[in-house]
Amino acid sequence: MINRLSRLPQRLLTVAALTVAIAISGCQKTPDADDTKTDTGTQDSTQTINQTSDTQLSQTTPKTNSAEQQAPLTILALGDSLTEGLGVDNDANYPAQLQTRLQELGYKDIKVINSGLSGETSTGLVNRLDWVLQTKPDITILTIGANDAIRGIDVATVEANIRTAVKRLQDNDSVVILGGMQIYDNLGSDYVKSFAAIYPRVAKDMNVTLIPFFLDGVGGDPKLNQADAIHPTKEGYTFIVNDNILPILQPELKKINPSNVTNTPTETAQ
C-alpha cells in the first residue's frame, strides 16, 4: 500500500506531461487552404512568366531570321571610266540610273554600288579586288578592258586578268555579269578580233552571263556620246541601262531572290 501511494505522484506527473504535450500540439496551426493556394499561385506565376519568356524568345528568333533573309541585295558595278561615268553628273552614270530604274520597276531593297575608276586597266582592277569585295556583292557587273586595248596590252594578259577577277568574285559568292567590249579598227584587225573574242570565251568557260557588247547601240553614235566619242552622255547611259543591262540583269535577280519585288516588273525586251 505504501509503495502504491509512493508511485501516485509519479503517475500524476506523467499524466500532466502528456496533457501539456497534447495541448501544445493542438495549438499549432495546421496549414490551411489559403496558404496552399498562395504557394501554388506563386508557382503558377513563375511558370507563366517562364512560358511567356519562352514564347517571346521563340517568336523573336524567326523574326530575326526573316530580317536576315530580307537583307538588301547588293549589285557591284565594277570597271573603269565607263562605269564611273566620266563627264556626267553623279546621278547620270549607269549605276545611278540603274538604281533608279530598278526602283521604278518595283524592285525593293536593292543597292547599286559604283566602283568604277577612270583609267583602270584589268591589272589595276585585280589589284583592288580585296577592297571592293568588302561590299559583299550579290551580283557584279564587270566591265573592264577598254584601257588595256588603248594601251595595246597583250590580249593574253587581259584575258588572264579578267579570268582572275571573275574567279575571285565567284569564290566570294557573287554572280558575275560580264560586259563585253569591242575596240576601234585602228588598232589592227588581228588585235581587234582577238580582243573581242576574250569575253564570250571567258563567259562560256567560267559559266557567267554575258552582255555581248556593253556599248551596243551607243558606241559610235555622236548623239549618245560626249565630245571625246568614247564616253556616253546621260542619254547614252539611259540606253545602256534599259537595252543592254536590264534584259540580262532581271533574270539573274529573279533567280537570286524572287520576293525582292513589290510588284511584278515587266522584263525589258532584248
Image (cartoon, grey):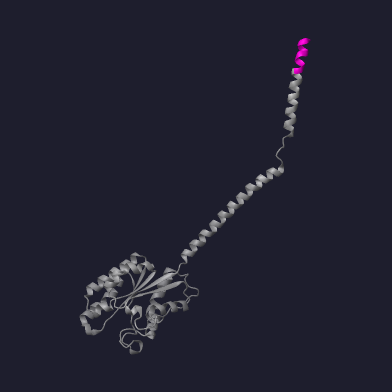
Q: Give the image quarter of residue 227.
A: bottom left
Task: Look at 42% across and 68% down and name the residue there.
Answer: 256
Which residue is outermost to the top? Answer: 1
Relative vertical location of residue 224 with respect to residue 159 in this rendering, above or below: below
Name the quarter where the C terminus is drawn. bottom left
In this rendering, position of residue 144 left or right of residue 46:
left
Indicate the position of residue 175 as horizontal and vertical percent values: 37, 69
Residue plotted at (60% across, 52% down): 49
- The residue at the far bottom in this view is 223
Q: How many marks?
A: 0
Residue 55 place in picture, x, y as percent: 57, 56
Question: In the picture, residue 132 is in which quadrant?
Answer: bottom left
**Quarter the N terminus occupies:** top right
> Residue, x 59% and y 54% (percent of image)?
52
Query: Which of these two is toward me, 248 or 18?
Result: 18
Q: Is residue 2 magenta?
A: yes
In percent of width and height, residue 167 lies at 31, 67
Q: Is residue 192 positioned above or below 31 on the image?
A: below
Indicate left or right for 190 with 228 as reference. Answer: left
Camera sees residue 64:
yes
Residue 270 visible in the snapshot: no
Predominant SS along the magenta part: helix
Where residue 99 sits in the image (x, y, percent)? 43, 77
Left/right of residue 160 with respect to residue 252 in the rendered view: left
Segment colored magenta: 1-9
> Is residue 41 highlighted in magenta?
no
Given residues 86 and 82, the one toward you in this image is 86
